C-alpha cells in the first residue's frame, strides 16, 4: 500500500480531550476519528488492526471447535421482554419502534446476543445427540453507555466476538468453558497483549464459573487483586481477603462505653475528625434489605471497619439471598431510631447481624449510637455486642493476605478485554430451549457465554505498548509489518528500489506501507515512529551509492546497513523474534 493512496491523517498536536495514551495515539496516528460521543470511525490503518485482531480471534475460535454464524444487530423487543433483560438493561438497551405498513415494529439493537441465539437453538436443537455445540460471531454491539470514554475503550457501538456454548449438563459446559478459556489465552498471546485471567462474579452456577481477561493498565477502569506468588487474581467484586475468623477476646481492663453528641456528623470522616480517632478505630454499620418483596425478605445489618468498603456480593452470599440492596431512609429510621449515619451494633434488634472478620477486633471502637446525632466510644465486641461468627464481607485491598496462601496481595488496575461465563439455564429456561435426553426426559440446555471486545484488543495493545514518539505495535495486529521510506522522492533510482522492495515484501507475505509522499525525511521519520509499524526500511541516495539500505525495528535505536537484495530476508528475520 502506498501512503498517497490511503488516508492516514496524522496529527502533530495532542488532542486536548483525550485522557489516556491509547486514545491520544489512535487520534494522532490517524487510526480513528470521533463521529459523536461514543461512536468512532476507523480509518484505513485502524481498521486493518481491527481486522487483524478479528482474524486471530476467528482462527482460534475455529481451532477450539466453534462455528461462526452471524446475527442481525436488531431483534424483536419481545425476546428481551421474555428474558427480563429489557428491564435489567434499562437505558443501556437501545430500542425503538418504527412504523411498517399499518403496524409498529419495536426492535432492540443487541448489546449481546443470548436472547436471539437461545431462540435459534430452541428452534434448531431437539436432542442430546446434537450437543454439545459452540457458536460464535464477530459483530457490532450497541450499548447506550452512561459514560462513553477513553476513545474506543468504551463506546456505544463496538465490535464484539461473542460465543455461546450449548450442552446437556454441567460436564459438557465445563469442557466448552475450558476450551474457550484456553483459546482466549492463545488469542491474547498472539495479539501481543499482556493479560491476567481474573476470577469474577460467578452467577448461577457458582464456584469457579466466570473469568474476566484483564489487560493490566494504569488507566484501566477495573480493579484487580493479584498475588504474583500464587497466581491468584480476582476482580474487586469477587476477591477474597484471605482473612480468617479471629478469636474475640475482651481485654481485661477495657474502659466503659461513653455516648457522646455528634450533631450532624454522619460520615466516618467527620466522626474521626470530631472525636480525633483514625477510621481504623471506628465501625460502620450498614443496613440492607435482602430478597426485598419476597417471602424471605429480611433486614440485615453489616458491620465493617470504618476504613473498609462493604461488598454487596459477599453480603448477599453470606445471607444466602438472591438480591440485596441498601435499606431506604425510612427503614433505617424505623430499625435504628435514627437517621442514616448513626447506626451501630450495640442494642440493635430486629435484624440479622453480620460482622466482617476485621470488625470484631477493633477494640475499643467508635460506633453509631442508634440515636440521632450520637456516637458511642469504647465499644468492645464480645462485651457490648456479639456475633456467633464472622465473615469476609468487605472489598479486598492491597496488603491483604492471599487466600491461596501466597503472601500479600497487590491491587492492579486493568482493562477488561474478554469474559467467559458459565450461564447455566437462565436463558434456556426463560426462552424454552430444551432437549430430549437419552432418558427421554426434556431438560433445559446448559449454556455458557464468551465475549471479547475486538476494539479493546487494539486500544489495549496501544495502551500497553507505546513510547513518547508513538505506537509500538505488537506484530500480531500491526496494520502493516514493514514501513518502507524512500528519502529522496525526486530520485528515480531511490523510488524504483522502494517500489521493488515493497513488492518483494508483499510477495514474501510481509504486508507493507510505502511512504511515497513528497515530504521531508524528518516528517516521514516522525510519522513512522508515530504509526509504529514493527519494522522499517529506509532508502536514500547516499546509501544506495554505497550499496546499502537501512533496516531497523521500531524498538531499535540504530539501523543496520543491509544490501538491498538482502533487505527482505532481514526484515523477515527481525519479524520472527
Ligand atoms: P464493562 O464492565 O467494561 O462495561 P462488560 O462486562 O459489560 O464490560 P461484557 O458484557 O462482558 O462487558 O462484554 C464482553 C466484552 O465486550 C468485554 O469484555 C469488553 O471487552 C467488550 N465491551 C463491553 N462493553 C464495551 C464497550 N462499551 N465498548 C467497547 N467494548 C466493550
Ligand atoms: Mg464482562
Image (spheres, grey):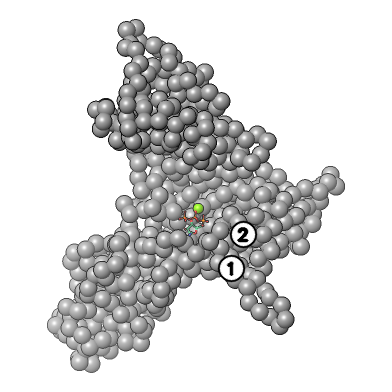
Q: In what quadrant of the picture does the N terminus appear?
A: bottom left
Residue 95's label in the rendered image is 1
The quadrant the C terminus occupies is: bottom left
Asked whether residue 307 is in view, the answer is: no
Q: Position of residue 481 (x, y in %)?
A: 35, 71
Quarter where residue 32 is shown? bottom left
Image height of 90 relative to 397, above or below = below
Residue furthest out toward the top: 252
Query: Looking at the image, is mark 1 or mark 2 earlier in the sequence?
Result: 2
Tell me residue 117's x, y (percent). 66, 62
Vertical position of residue 115 compared to residue 272: above or below: below
Name the residue at 65% across, 34% down: 296
Residue name at image x 76 percent, y 53 percent: 434
Residue 347, compared with residue 337, is above or below; it is above
CA neighbours of label 2 inside 10 A, class few (<14), some (14 to 19), many (20+)? some
Instruction: Determine which of the numbered discs, if any, sits on residue 287 in the image.
Output: none
Q: Residues within 10 Å of mark 1 (few under 14, many from 20)?
A: some
- Front residue of 230/294: it is 294
Residue positioned 24% across, 62% down in the render: 467
Q: Position of residue 381 (x, y in %)?
A: 42, 17
Residue 271's quadrant in the figure?
Answer: top left
In this view of the protein, can residue 334 be seen by the observer? Answer: yes
Q: Position of residue 295 (x, y in %)?
A: 68, 36
Q: Residue at x 56, y 43 (%)?
A: 202
Q: CA distance from mark 1 to mark 2?
A: 9 Å
Per the image, the residue denoted by label 2 is: 86
> Front-most of 282 and 2?
282
Q: Look at the numbered discs 1 and 2 and tell me whether their residues touch, using CB distance below 8 Å.
A: yes
Q: Quadrant of residue 503?
A: bottom left
Amino acid at each position: 500500500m502506498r501512503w498517497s493512496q490511503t488516508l492516514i491523517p496524522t496529527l502533530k498536536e495532542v488532542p486536548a480531550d483525550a485522557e489516556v495514551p491509547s486514545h491520544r495515539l489512535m487520534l494522532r496516528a490517524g487510526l480513528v476519528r470521533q463521529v459523536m460521543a461514543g461512536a468512532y470511525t476507523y480509518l484505513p490503518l485502524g481498521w486493518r488492526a481491527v481486522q487483524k485482531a478479528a482474524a486471530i480471534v476467528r482462527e482460534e475460535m475455529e481451532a477450539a471447535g466453534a462455528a461462526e454464524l452471524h446475527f442481525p444487530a436488531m431483534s424483536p423487543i419481545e425476546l428481551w421482554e421474555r428474558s427480563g433483560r429489557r428491564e435489567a438493561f434499562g437505558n443501556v438497551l437501545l430500542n425503538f419502534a418504527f412504523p411498517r405498513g399499518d403496524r409498529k415494529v419495536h426492535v432492540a439493537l443487541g448489546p449481546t446476543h443470548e436472547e436471539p441465539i437461545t431462540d435459534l437453538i430452541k428452534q434448531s436443537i431437539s436432542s442430546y445427540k446434537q450437543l454439545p455445540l459452540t457458536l460464535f460471531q464477530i459483530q457490532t454491539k450497541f450499548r447506550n453507555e452512561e459514560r462513553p470514554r477513553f476513545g474506543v475503550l468504551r463506546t456505544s457501538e463496538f465490535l464484539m466476538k461473542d460465543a455461546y456454548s450449548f450442552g446437556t449438563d454441567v460436564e459438557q459446559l465445563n469442557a466448552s468453558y475450558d476450551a474457550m478459556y484456553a483459546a482466549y489465552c492463545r488469542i491474547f498471546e498472539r495479539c501481543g497483549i499482556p493479560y491476567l485471567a481474573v476470577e469474577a462474579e460467578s452467577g448461577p452456577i457458582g464456584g469457579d464459573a466466570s473469568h474476566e481477561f484483564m489487560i493490566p493498565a494504569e488507566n484501566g477502569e477495573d480493579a484487580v487483586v493479584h498475588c504474583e506468588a500464587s497466581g491468584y487474581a480476582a476482580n474487586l467484586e469477587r476477591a477474597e481477603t484471605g482473612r480468617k475468623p479471629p478469636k474475640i477476646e475482651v481485654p481485661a481492663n477495657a474502659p466503659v462505653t461513653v455516648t457522646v453528641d455528634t450533631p450532624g456528623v454522619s460520615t466516618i470522616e467527620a466522626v474521626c475528625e470530631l472525636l480525633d480517632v483514625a477510621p481504623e478505630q471506628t465501625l460502620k454499620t450498614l443496613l440492607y434489605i435482602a430478597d426485598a418483596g419476597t417471602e424471605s425478605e429480611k433486614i440485615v445489618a453489616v458491620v465493617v471497619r470504618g476504613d473498609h468498603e462493604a461488598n454487596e456480593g459477599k453480603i448477599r452470599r453470606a445471607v444466602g439471598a438472591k438480591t440485596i440492596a441498601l435499606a431506604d431512609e425510612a427503614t433505617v429510621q424505623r430499625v435504628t431510631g435514627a437517621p442514616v449515619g448513626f447506626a451501630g451494633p450495640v442494642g440493635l434488634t430486629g435484624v440479622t447481624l453480620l460482622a466482617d472478620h476485621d470488625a470484631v477486633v477493633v477494640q475499643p471502637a467508635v460506633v453509631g449510637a442508634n440515636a440521632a446525632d450520637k456516637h458511642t466510644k469504647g465499644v468492645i465486641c464480645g462485651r457490648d455486642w456479639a456475633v456467633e461468627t464472622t465473615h469476609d464481607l468487605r472489598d479486598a485491598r492491597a496488603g491483604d493476605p492471599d487466600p491461596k496462601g501466597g503472601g500479600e496481595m497487590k491491587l492492579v488496575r486493568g482493562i477488561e478485554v474478554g469474559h467467559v461465563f458459565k450461564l447455566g439455564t437462565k436463558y434456556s429456561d426463560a426462552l424454552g430451549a430444551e432437549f430430549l435426553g437419552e432418558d427421554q426426559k426434556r431438560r433445559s440446555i446448559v449454556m455458557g457465554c464468551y465475549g471479547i471486545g475486538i476494539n479493546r484488543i487494539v486500544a489495549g495493545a496501544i495502551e500497553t505498548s507505546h513510547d513518547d514518539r508513538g505506537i509500538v505495535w505488537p506484530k500480531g495486529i500491526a496494520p502493516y509489518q514493514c514501513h518502507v521510506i524512500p528519502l529522496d522522492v525526486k530520485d528515480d533510482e531511490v523510488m524504483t528500489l522502494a517500489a521493488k522492495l515493497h513488492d518483494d515484501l508483499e510477495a514474501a507475505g510481509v504486508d507493507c506501507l510505502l511512504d511515497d509522499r513528497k515530504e521531508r525525511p524528518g516528517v516521514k521519520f516522525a510519522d513512522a515512529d508515530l504509526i509504529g509499524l514493527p519494522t522499517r526500511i529506509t532508502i536514500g541516495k547516499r546509501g544506495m551509492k554505497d550499496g546499502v539500505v537501512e533496516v531497523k525495528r521500531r524498538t531499535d535505536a540504530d539501523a543496520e546497513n543491509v544490501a538491498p537484495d538482502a533487505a527482505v530476508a532481514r526484515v523477515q528475520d527481525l519479524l520472527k523474534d
